[in-house]
Amino acid sequence: MTLKQSLRAELTERLRRLDGAYKAAADRAIRSAIVQSKLYGEAGVLFTYVGRNDEIDTLPLIEQALAEGKRVCAPAVRGGGVMDAKEIASVDDLTLGAMNLIEPCGSCPPIEPQEIELVLVPCISCDPCGNRLGYGGGYYDRYLKRLRPSDACSGTAEIRRRDARTAGCPDAAHDASSIRRHGVRRPAPFLVLCRERMLSQNLPAHPLDVRMDYCVTEAGVFPALRDD
């Protein structure tokens, strides 16, 4: 068993043992932190998973976003380990799909990665550097790379770092006006949702893993620490 597999088993058991009242309160606080953030306020197109079992419950957030007139899309799994995004008009468009995931029904239209303006990602655990421990399928890592195919060569990554260092505030790294000043399209921020009791100090990371831009807990929205 690899280190990641061992950690996944250990942390999944810890997640399963969390008190129901704590989980419900933490989930409400996490949703509140998201909707009060500038990142959410500026986003017109939201990509979010649909929480199930012990995952953070995103359904009330989805309903609120739709009521506010935002476009909402959710992941839909297809063969070969590939995940796409499909737009929903209502929570009634959600159904039980592949691998017992709640996903958009077959008639929901696909949405192109470049249309998405904010991404909410699940995890079992995450650390302060934005490393996340998922469920081992690699679906999110593969999909998120499609949202930033030219990040390294376009200069977008450096702009995010430069503006964050200059302004010294969480939302600066994705300020839309800053991206426009540099003539580069704003990349969709990646937010990983994690309850405080499931945080890790230092998770193992593979070079192909996609790091998150922000970690959201019941304490708020925090920019991931960077070593660059």
Image (tube, helix red, strand yellow):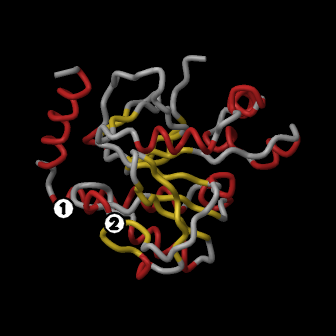
Label 2 neighbour load within 10 Å: few <14, some 14-19, many 20+:
some
Identified by mark 1, the residue type is: Ala
Q: Is residue 88 left or right of residue 14?
A: right
Residue that badge 1 annotates = 21
Q: Which mark is residue 102?
A: 2
Nearer the observer: mark 1 or 2; the answer is: 2
Q: Quadrant of residue 200?
A: top left
Identified by mark 2, the residue type is: Ile
Q: In what element is the residue under mark 2?
A: strand
Tell me: residue 4, above or below residue 90: above
- Count all numbered tags in the image, as a single digit: 2
Q: Nearer the viewer, residue 86 or 125?
A: 86
Q: Quadrant of residue 158?
A: top right
Q: Is residue 202 left or right of residue 225?
A: left
Residue 75: x and y in percent read 45, 58
Q: In what element is the residue under mark 1?
A: helix
Q: Are marks 1 and 2 in contact (CB under 8 Å)?
A: no
Tell me: residue 33, above or below residue 9: below
Residue 194: x and y in percent read 35, 45
